[in-house]
Structure formats: structure tokens, C-alpha cells
């Protein structure tokens, strides 16, 4: 019995329990329904993960080889983040610092995220059903599969009861259910498409986290667009959109660039259909250059025309959005232009130095990659303290540049595509597939997401630093110390060491001890309790030690959720 229990509750699942427990215990009575929903989702995901990993059914999902499924961690992380933010807003609601509409919108996000994750769990159980002739289904683990089905049924019934209760059986109940279910269906379809188009690029849990996040992010922009269209059709006074100008610009830019490959692919099909069928060398060279011209022409049209029109329609800018960005930058020219120059110098020096080391040194790639984590700390911490709004915008611009470069690399767009591919390959690891390289995206988003989610009301000044502290300092120190001095391993099969984890936790605590007085001197009101801070740092450090998932994606979100309580 003890061996069965130990196999069910492995290190990663135990850390997830430690992650969820303080969130559920911090729940105010007014959010008890959302807490029940989160608990049911975790209960369901636990058994689904075990049943999927014990299933012998052939998988139609081409996941990253050698990685665990990560279903429990992937299904819980984003709903827990949304719920932690809701708890934070509930503290501000009685004080009048948050409007009721914003609080209710966050509730809808919580339910939508949970229903989306639940939809994926249902899909996974259907895909990984054991075969009738399976010997494993007759073994002692068959009760796990049955528990997965039972937990899904219980969770479905409870969700069907809880959401109408939350909606007070109003006329919007059906629309809310339809909206949440639409997110779930879209997430399932996109997971299938991404893992088929880019095989071996992610585990199930990683794909669930990223794809659901994109669906939620896109759904928010779609909702704002629909509201504006309805206002114009009904001739009513246009409603104001809750998001700031910067967040709307980032949303429009990122989503526009994510949709750009579809537009480019359609253009290539038109080019191939009406182009010359000749395959001579000269024609092939012209075709490559013609493809490049088409790419850059469509990219310019998207960035100059399509995205600004969409953003201006949603947010009602009085000027062109890119002109608004210039006005924003030059409203404090000395500070913001100085930061831009500082960032540019750090990037040029670091990239040149690290690339040279990667080609001419025997330093292991895992240590070389951690230099970029330290570079992120040196770049982002000063800006986050002195110019947080400008850093918000800069993160969005950096993400857009990364998207453009990755599209050029995947499509081998002349003349830079091949060079970008060779350069990026110098810093890849086993979690990057042959087609898609995601390491740089995960580092950037790991630092940016806590910052973006802290926009608006935030009574925990360390929460925006969650990504920078956990990745730039904690993860880096854990890797360096564990690699050089680690002896005691957490498990017989794993590479993570107790010494590395202790170094990571200690370094983050020291950084917080240094950072808090700086925040106080900058005018921030310190409300962070040291006990809760110690718990948050410890749980995120243990997650780094035990998880086989992409730690750059999960650790900052887990750390942010616990810091927001």
C-alpha cells in the first residue's frame, strides 16, 4: 500500500499539493464556489494524469519524448493564477480601489479558465482509453483509470451546478457557459494542431498551459472587439474597455503577428498557383527572393495597417497607435531613452560574448544559457523599479521581435532566416524541437507575465518581480551550484541536487531582502509577510527541483500566485 501511495504522489504532484494548499486556505468565504471548482479540477487532473501515464493506448499527440505528461501541473497552474488574482482583488473591493465590474470580469476569467482545462481533461480521457485487450487494464492499476472517469463525471456535474449558481440563474448563464465551452473547444483543437504541426515540441501539460493562455488572451481581445461592433450596430454610446492603452497595443501586436503566418501561407499558395512551374536554378533563386519580398511586404502591411486599425477600433485612440507609442516614450525622454540605450548595449555585448563562448569554449550549454538569465536581471530590475509602465511596453515589443525572428527562422526567409537558425541552434537544449525553438520565448514571458498581470491593482510589491527573481536569480543559482557542487540528488533518476535547490531558495530570499528596502524608498507600500514569502520561495524552489516540465513557463506563474495571496 505504501509503494502504491508513493508511486501516485511523486515529487511533482506533491509540490502541486503544496502549491494549491495555501491558495485554498487563503480563500475568503465570498469565493468559496471558485475554491470548490479549483479543488475539483485538481482532483480530476490528478487521476487523469495517472490514468494517461498508465494507459497503453497509442497516442495521437506527438509530445516531447522523455518528459512526463505534466497534466496535473498544466491543468492547475493557470486557473490557480486567475484565482490568486481574484483573491487579491477581493481585498481591494471593500476599500473601493477596484470597481465591481473589474472584479466580476476576473470571476468570469476564473470560470472560463477552469472550464477550458476541464474540457482538455475530458479530451485526454477519451483519447487515452485503454484497449479491450490491454493486460494493464486487468492489473491493479485499473482502478486508477476508473477513478479518472468517475472524477470527470463528478467534476462535470459539479461544474454544471456551480456555474448557474454563480450566475444566479440569470439570462447570461447560457452565454457564459457557451463562452467558456468555446474556449475549451478551441484549446483542444489548437493542442491537436500544434502538437501535429510541431511534433515533440512540448509535453501535454506545457501545451495545455501555453495554448489555453493564448486562447484566453485572444478571447479577451475578441470580446472587446465584439463589444465595440455591437455598440456601433446598436448606435449606443461606445463602452470603455477595461484594458490600458499599453495592454491593448501589446494584445493587438502579438495576436496580429500570431495570425500573420496564416496570411503568409495563403499568399504562398496563391504565388505557387499562379507562378511559373519552371524549376531552373535561376527561377528557384528568383522564387526565394520573391518569397522574401512577399514576406516583408505582408509584414509591413500587417504592422502599419491591419494591427493599428484593429487596436484603434478597440481602444478609441485619438491618434495613430504607433504615434501614441512615440508620444509615450518621449514624455520622459531622458529616463526612457537612457533605458533603451542601456538595454541595447547590454544585449549587443552579451550576445556577442556568449555566442563567442559557445563556439570556442567547453562550457556546458546549460551553464551558458544561465548567463542570459543573469542578463535579464541586469536589464529588467532597474526598469521595473524606475519605469514599470515603460517596461510593460518594452516586453511587448521584445515579444513581437522574437515572433518575427522565429517566423523568419522557421520559413527560412532570405537573407536572414538561415543565419538566425544557425545562431539560435547554439543555445538550444533537449526541450527545443527540430522545428520550433521556444527557450527564448519562455524566458521572456516568464519575466513579463507577472509584470503584465500585476497591472492595475496590486498590493504585493514583490509580485511583479516573480519571474525575474525565480528565473534570473533562483533558477540560475540552483543550476550553477548544483552542477558544480551538487552531491545529494533528490531522486535516483533525476539530475537536480539538494545543494542546488538550497542555493536557489537562499539566493531568492537574499534578493528579496535587498529589494524590499529599495521598493520602500521608491514609494511602494510593503505588505508582504515574511512567512508567506518563505513559503512561496520554497514551493517554487521545490518545483524547479522536481518538475520535468519547462520550468521557465511554470515556476514564475506558481511564484506569482503565491506572492499575490
Image: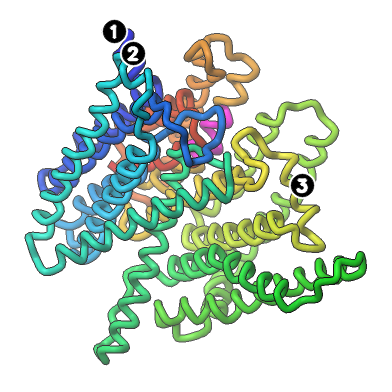
Tell me how the rendering is colored.
rainbow
**Would residue 519 appear left or right of 85 to someone viewing this image?**
right
Residue 23 seen in the figure = yes
Residue 531 seen in the figure = no
Structural crowding at the residue carrying mark 3, measured as other residues with C-alpha within 10 Å and reported as few (<14), some (14–19) or many (≥20): few
Q: Secondary structure at mark 2?
A: helix
Residue beneath disc 1: 2
Q: Between marks 2 and 1, how big is the CA–CA gap? A: 6 Å
Residue placed furthest toward the front: 133
Q: Is residue 331 above or below residue 140?
A: below
Q: Which mark is residue 6?
A: 2
Whether residue 239 appears in magenta in the rendering, the answer is no
Span shown in magenta = 469-477
| Closer to viewer: mark 3 or mark 1 | 1
Looking at the image, which residue is at 15% across and 63% down? Answer: 173
**Would residue 438 appear left or right of 174 to someone viewing this image?**
right
Mark before the other along the chain sequence, 3 or 2? 2
Quadrant of the snapshot with the C terminus:
top left
Q: Quadrant of residue 29?
A: top left
Q: Which mark is residue 243?
A: none
| Residue nearest the viewer, comparing 493 with 284 | 284
| Residue nearest the viewer, comparing 158 with 56 | 56
Q: Between marks 3 and 2, how big is the CA–CA gap? A: 44 Å
Q: Marks 1 and 2: in contact by CB < 8 Å?
A: yes
Looking at the image, which residue is at 57% across and 57% down? Answer: 399
Query: x and y percent of residue 152 in the render?
Result: 23, 38
Residue beneath disc 3: 423
Looking at the image, which residue is at 17% across and 47% down? Answer: 159
Residue placed furthest toward the top: 2
Structural crowding at the residue carrying mark 2, measured as other residues with C-alpha within 10 Å and reported as few (<14), some (14–19) or many (≥20): few
Amino acid at each position: 500500500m505504501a509503494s502504491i501511495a508513493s508511486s501516485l504522489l511523486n515529487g511533482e504532484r506533491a509540490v502541486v499539493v503544496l502549491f494549491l494548499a495555501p491558495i485554498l486556505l487563503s480563500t475568503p468565504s465570498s469565493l468559496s464556489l471558485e475554491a470548490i471548482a479549483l479543488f475539483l479540477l485538481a482532483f480530476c487532473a490528478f487521476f487523469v494524469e495517472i490514468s494517461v501515464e498508465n494507459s497503453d493506448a497509442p497516442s495521437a499527440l506527438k509530445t516531447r519524448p522523455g518528459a512526463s505528461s505534466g497534466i496535473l501541473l498544466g491543468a492547475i497552474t493557470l486557473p490557480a493564477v486567475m484565482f490568486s488574482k481574484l483573491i487579491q482583488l477581493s481585498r481591494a473591493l471593500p476599500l473601493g480601489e477596484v470597481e465591481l465590474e473589474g472584479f466580476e470580469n476576473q470571476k468570469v476569467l476564473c470560470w472560463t479558465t477552469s472550464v477550458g482545462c476541464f474540457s482538455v481533461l475530458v479530451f485526454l480521457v477519451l483519447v487515452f482509453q485503454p484497449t479491450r485487450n490491454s493486460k494493464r487494464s486487468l492489473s491493479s492499476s485499473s482502478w486508477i483509470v476508473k477513478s479518472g472517469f468517475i472524477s470527470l463525471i463528478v467534476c462535470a456535474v459539479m461544474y454544471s451546478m456551480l456555474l448557474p449558481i454563480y450566475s444566479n440563474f440569470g439570462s447570461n448563464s447560457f452565454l457564459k457557459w457557451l463562452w467558456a465551452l468555446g474556449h475549451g473547444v478551441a484549446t483542444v483543437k489548437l493542442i491537436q494542431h500544434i502538437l501535429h504541426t510541431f511534433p515533440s515540441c512540448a509535453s501535454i501539460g506545457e501545451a495545455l498551459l501555453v495554448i489555453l493562455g493564448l486562447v484566453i488572451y485572444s478571447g479577451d481581445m475578441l470580446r472587446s472587439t465584439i463589444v465595440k461592433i455591437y455598440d456601433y450596430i446598436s448606435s449606443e454610446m461606445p463602452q470603455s474597455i477595461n484594458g490600458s492603452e499599453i495592454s491593448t497595443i501589446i494584445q493587438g501586436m502579438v495576436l496580429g503577428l500570431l495570425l500573420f503566418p496564416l496570411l503568409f501561407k495563403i499568399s504562398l499558395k496563391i504565388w505557387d498557383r499562379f507562378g511559373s512551374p519552371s524549376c531552373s536554378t535561376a527561377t528557384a533563386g528568383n522564387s526565394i527572393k520573391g518569397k522574401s519580398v512577399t514576406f516583408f511586404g505582408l509584414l509591413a502591411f500587417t504592422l502599419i495597417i491591419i494591427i493599428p486599425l484593429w487596436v484603434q477600433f478597440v481602444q478609441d485612440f485619438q491618434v495613430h497607435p504607433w504615434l501614441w507609442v512615440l508620444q509615450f516614450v518621449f514624455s520622459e525622454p531622458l529616463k526612457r531613452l537612457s533605458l533603451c540605450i542601456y538595454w541595447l548595449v547590454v544585449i549587443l555585448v552579451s550576445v556577442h560574448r556568449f555566442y563567442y563562448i559557445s563556439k570556442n569554449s567547453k562550457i556546458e550549454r546549460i551553464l551558458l544559457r544561465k548567463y542570459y538569465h543573469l542578463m535579464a536581471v541586469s536589464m529588467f530590475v532597474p526598469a521595473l523599479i524606475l519605469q514599470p509602465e515603460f517596461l510593460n511596453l518594452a516586453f511587448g515589443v521584445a515579444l513581437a521581435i522574437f515572433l518575427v525572428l522565429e517566423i523568419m527562422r522557421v520559413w527560412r526567409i532570405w537573407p536572414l532566416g538561415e543565419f538566425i537558425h544557425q545562431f539560435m541552434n547554439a543555445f538550444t537544449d533537449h526541450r527545443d524541437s527540430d522545428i520550433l525553438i521556444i527557450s527564448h520565448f519562455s524566458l521572456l514571458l516568464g519575466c513579463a507575465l507577472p509584470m503584465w498581470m500585476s497591472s492595475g491593482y496590486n498590493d504585493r510589491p514583490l509580485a511583479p518581480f516573480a519571474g525575474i527573481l525565480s528565473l534570473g536569480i533562483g533558477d540560475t543559482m540552483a543550476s550553477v551550484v548544483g552542477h558544480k557542487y551538487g552531491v545529494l540528488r533528490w531522486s535516483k533518476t533525476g539530475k537536480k541536487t539538494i545543494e542546488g535547490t538550497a542555493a536557489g531558495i537562499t539566493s531568492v530570499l537574499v534578493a528579496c531582502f535587498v529589494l524590499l528596502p529599495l521598493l520602500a524608498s521608491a514609494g511602494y507600500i510593503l505588505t508582504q509577510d515574511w512567512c508567506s514569502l518563505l513559503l512561496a520561495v520554497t514551493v517554487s524552489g521545490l518545483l524547479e527541483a522536481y518538475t520535468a516540465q519547462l520550468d521557465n513557463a511554470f515556476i514564475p506563474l506558481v511564484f506569482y500566485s503565491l506572492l499575490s495571496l
